[in-house]
């Protein structure tokens, strides 16, 4: 069963994040000047240690920041559609958000059970989304829901329709959430650690499903993960975050073959020690600064083997290195690579 839809040909990125600042409760600037774009149909992997600001970045693009956290700088823009102009998300009212979230941007998170209503069948929850989001009448929503459950690889989708969340495994629940997330044919799917809690085999199946949906629906994917191997397999580009900032950005193969930022290098070094398991990013010696800590220079300086007095003297820019690569480091910039 296919979920094939016609993808309108529109120029420009699906998502542009430009100088995003997020302030958390207590006043710390936990996301600092994050800028990146996501092309149509492109898959971008967002990696970094826990606490680096990945989820706050994703949640800003969905208008679902935790209580006490707010966007205090920058812009997030959804690209133009066939007929409409670009949509600046920070300017949206609550009602306008409802036309974006779940419709133009879908999302899946780590803990699918907590995003489902435990007292309603999963079929009813998907059908409701189709009724509200796509205006389908009840019978058509039911038929489409069963079809979508089949398309995301759930066996006996007509039976799954009548099951409650507690009757399904974690992998099945994640498929249900993916079906809900893509049901309104969004341009962008944000998957924040969506496979982290699943065992390796199920994780691989879910990643394969996301890749297939991407190919069929032409959706762009922002994939947040701890796992560099996941990015290597599934993403065109990699964005590396450290202590609230983007420190490296570029085509996945090139960045992983020859990282420009010492933090990316460190991630790769520990990832290659596969014996430590799949959450290797947490074992780089030293600790990142507190979220929002005000430091004069490079935020990685006290964990870096190459630190010079210049690194801590003042803010380090995200230098353009050519070939679609950027790094927030003086070394590649000074070696003449900067353009
Ligand atoms: N609800 C919150 N209240 C206060 N601080 C928060 C909240 N959520 C996140 N933070 C802070 O912002 C930082 C980044 O969080 P997050 O984006 O969730 O990191 P990641 O997803 O990369 O693990 C955290 O280290 C934490 O200090
Ligand atoms: Mg997170």
Image (cartoon, rainbow, N blue to C red):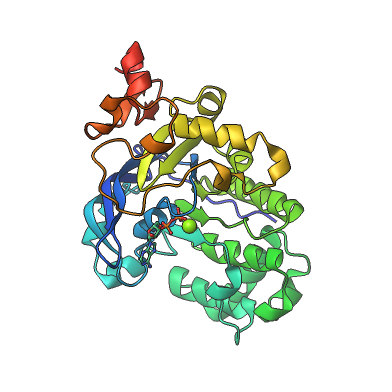
x and y percentages locating residue 51 in the rendered image: 44, 54
In-front residue for pair 47/9 = 47
For the view shown, which residue lies furthest in the bottom direction? Answer: 119
Tell me the quarter of the picture where residue 39 sits.
Answer: top left
Please, is residue 323 above or below residue 41 in the view?
Answer: above
x and y percentages locating residue 256 in the rendered image: 55, 28
Q: Which residue is drawn at 72% across and 74% down?
A: 168
Left or right: 81, with 157 as reference point: left
In-front residue for pair 75/131 = 75
x and y percentages locating residue 148 in the rendered image: 63, 63
Please, is residue 236 above or below residue 137 in the view?
Answer: above
Please, is residue 54 above or below residue 98 in the view?
Answer: above
x and y percentages locating residue 27 in the rendered image: 24, 63
Quadrant of the image containing the C terminus:
top left
Q: How many marks?
A: 0
Can residue 163 be seen by looking at this rendering? Answer: no
For the view shown, which residue lies furthest in the right direction? Answer: 156
Quadrant of the image containing the N terminus:
bottom right
Left or right: 150, with 333 as reference point: right
Left or right: 61, with 180 as reference point: left
Ligand 1 position by quadrant: bottom left
Can residue 5 be seen by looking at this rendering? Answer: yes
Q: Residue at x 31, y 35 (%)?
A: 298
Q: Which residue is drawn at 52% across and 77% down?
A: 128
């Amino acid at each position: 069963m296919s979920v094939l839809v016609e993808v309108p040909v529109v120029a420009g990125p699906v998502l542009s994040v430009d100088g995003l600042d997020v302030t958390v409760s207590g006043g710390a600037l936990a996301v600092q000047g994050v800028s990146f774009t996501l092309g149509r149909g492109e898959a971008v992997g967002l990696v970094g240690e826990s606490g680096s600001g990945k989820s706050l970045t994703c949640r800003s693009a969905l208008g679902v920041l935790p209580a006490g956290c707010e966007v205090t700088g920058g812009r997030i823009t959804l690209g133009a559609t066939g007929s409409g102009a670009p949509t600046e998300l920070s300017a949206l009212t609550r009602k306008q958000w409802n036309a974006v979230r779940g419709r133009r941007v879908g999302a899946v998170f780590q803990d699918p059970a907590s995003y489902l209503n435990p007292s309603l069948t999963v079929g009813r929850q998907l059908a409701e989304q189709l009724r509200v989001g796509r205006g389908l009448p009840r019978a058509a929503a039911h038929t489409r829901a069963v079809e979508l459950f089949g398309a995301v690889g759930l066996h006996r989708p007509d039976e799954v329709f009548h099951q409650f969340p507690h009757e399904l495994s974690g992998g099945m629940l994640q498929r249900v959430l993916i079906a809900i997330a893509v049901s309104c044919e969004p341009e962008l799917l944000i998957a924040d650690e969506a496979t982290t809690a699943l065992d390796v085999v199920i994780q691989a199946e879910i990643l394969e499903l996301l890749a297939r949906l991407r190919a069929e629906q032409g959706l762009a994917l922002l994939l947040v993960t701890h796992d560099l191997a996941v990015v290597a397999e599934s993403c065109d580009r990699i964005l590396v975050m450290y202590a609230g900032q983007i420190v490296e950005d570029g085509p996945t193969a090139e960045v992983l073959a020859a990282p420009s930022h010492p933090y990316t290098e460190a991630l790769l070094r520990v990832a290659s020690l596969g014996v430590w398991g799949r959450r290797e990013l947490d074992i780089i010696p030293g600790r990142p600064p507190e979220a929002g800590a005000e430091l004069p220079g490079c935020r990685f300086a006290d964990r870096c083997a190459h630190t010079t007095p210049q690194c801590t003297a003042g803010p380090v820019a995200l230098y353009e290195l050519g070939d679609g690569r950027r790094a927030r480091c003086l070394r590649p910039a000074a070696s003449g690579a900067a353009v």
